[in-house]
Image (cartoon, grey):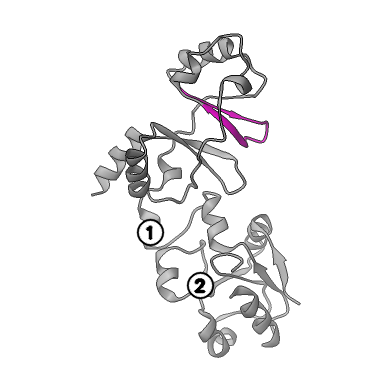
Amino acid sequence: MPTEIDRGEVQKLMDRGAQLVEVLPPDEYEEDHLPGAISLPLRRLETEAVRVLDRARPVIVYCWDTA
Amino acid sequence: MSPRAAWRLESLGFGEVYDYVDGKLDWMAAGLRTEGTNAAHPRAGDVARKDVPVAGLEDRLGDVRQRVSASGWDAVVVTNTERVVFGLLRSKELAKDAELTLEQAMRPGPSTFRPHRAITEMAEHMTAHLLDSSPITTSDGRLVGLLLRTDAVRVAGEKE
């Protein structure tokens, strides 16, 4: 079950080398994204996640907010 | 959207998956750095003056006025020890009876703005609403700084 985390925990996990994934559309990623995040919109997750992400490291996903 | 992504990653065999539920909006509202095409544009949090005087609810106006004036300011933000904003005193409020506490003299609950607001947008808003200054706060109400309209208009003009 994925764990819900807050901003402070994101920063701690980033220090541990977690992979940050923005799942919003690419144009929104281009404008602003968290430092070091990669763009992996929800529709591309199925086909690209295994190729671009490391299963051995933590993964943090985010979008705009709780919506 | 992110919960679905998190669940799907788990089903694809990723063992340690986290969902930052408050997302990009929360990150930006905290004034934290981002990357991307917008990152080069000045925002409210970049331009807000971080050296604005702060004081507590119980402080005596006469004492605060003296300190504020000596530091070259004509405004003071009233916060608690966590820097959560409770009120604002501009020159009009600072001129009140010296024996009042800041709680009695302040303008309570001033409108605050998040650090990620574009400076052009802030300049337009502050001009339209005749706001000389506006506290910039994080999403949990903590003071980042005081944005002066003169600064917002100047920086917005430089950007154009």
> Which chain letter goes with mark 2?
A
Please state which amino acid type lies under the numbered disc 1.
Asn
Callout 1: helix, strand or loop? helix
Left or right of B155, for residue A42: right
Look at 36% across and 44% down and name the residue there: B125
Which is in the foreground here, disc 2 or disc 1? 1
Q: Which mark is residue B38?
A: 1
Q: Is residue B85 magenta?
A: yes
Callout 2: helix, strand or loop? strand
Q: Which residue is mark 2?
A: A38
Seen in the picture, residue B150 relative to B41 is either above or below; the reply is above
Q: Position of residue B32 (x, y in %)?
A: 53, 51
Please state which amino acid type lies under the numbered disc 2.
Ile
- Residue at the limit of the structure toward the right, as seen here: A1
> Which chain letter goes with mark 1?
B
Q: Quadrant of the N terminus of chain B?
A: bottom right
Look at 58% across and 49% down and name the residue there: B139
Q: How many marks?
A: 2
The answer to whether the residues at label 2 and label 1 have Cβ atoms under 8 Å apart is no
Seen in the picture, residue A41 relative to A33 is either above or below; the reply is below
Q: Position of residue B62 (x, y in %)?
A: 56, 10
Distance Cα–Cα, label 2 vs label 1: 16 Å
Q: Which mark is residue B92?
A: none
- Residue at the limit of the structure toward the bottom, as seen here: A47
Q: Is residue A20 magenta?
A: no
The magenta region covers B75-88
Q: Position of residue B90 (x, y in %)?
A: 46, 24
Left or right of B18, for residue B135: left
Of B130 and B15, nearer the camera is B130
